[in-house]
Amino acid sequence: MQLPEVGRGNISEAAADAVRAMIVDGRLSAGDRLNEVHLARQLGVSRTPLREALSGLVAEGALIARPRLGYFVRPLTLEEFEQIYDLRPLLDPEALRLAGVPSEKRIARLEKLNVDLARAKGLRAIEIDDAWHMELLADCPNKVLIEMIRNIIVRTRRYELALMREQKYVGAATRDHERIVAALKAGDLNAACAALKENMQSGRAPIVAWLKSRAARKGIKS
């Protein structure tokens, strides 16, 4: 699995994306120790950007680093997902409430991103969806709240990768975004916050079902 051609500064990000996909696909199983030499050769990268990628995956909870032993795959679990994912339906609407109704220019950028999202797949869809939400909340004055949301986005990315591979869920996200923007255009901040909360909750059931199915196939406790 060679990485696609990427800019020099993006090699570690591309390597992290590849390893994350390998975890979601099951090519790297929970508890597996990563062989850095083999993995670097497999991805066609040098050890330095690979180590940067692996360190980033430790920070987001996908890997565990053990001194003198290396990196190990952290399991995808229903318990972790539910504890993390249930936070954004609480945090994002509050951040939007504090941000207020966006300017016309920001609404135009939201609409453009949503058009791009409708055409995207997989990791690219996740990246655009994340960018859409950050654009929506850009005027929130509580920077600590925004940082908390950013941290949760990082922690849930490997779970959402499984969701956004199916185009029907990408379509559902774009329709949710359209409802949020329509409420904002009407100046109805309360309705927009309510629609945003629904959007944040919509991915929960399919990911839970995927995790349970995955655990059943592997004969493990989710």
Image: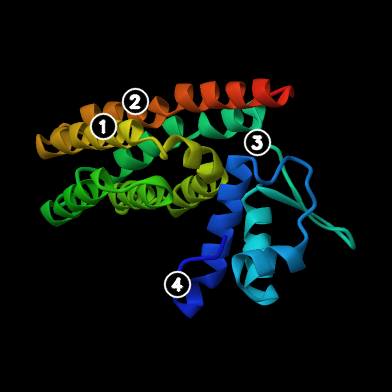
Q: Quadrant of residue 180?
A: top left
Mark 2, residue position: 198
Which is nearer the eye, 67 or 16?
16
Amino acid type of disc 1?
Asp
Residue depicted at x 80% and y 52%:
33
Mark 2 or mark 3: whose residue is earlier in sequence: 3
How many other residues sit within 10 Å of disc 1, few (<14), some (14-19) or many (≥20)?
many
Vertical relation: 134 (above or below) 26: below
Mark 4 or mark 1: whose residue is earlier in sequence:
4
Between discs 4 and 2, the one toward the N terminus: 4
Is the residue 111 above or below the residue 219 in the image? below
The spot of residue 70 in percent (x, y) is: 82, 59
Q: Quadrant of the C terminus?
A: top right
- The residue pinned by badge 3 equals 76
Q: Secondary structure at mark 1?
A: helix
Answer whether labels 1 and 2 touch (C-beta < 8 Å).
Answer: yes
Placement of 90 over or under 138, stated as above or below: above
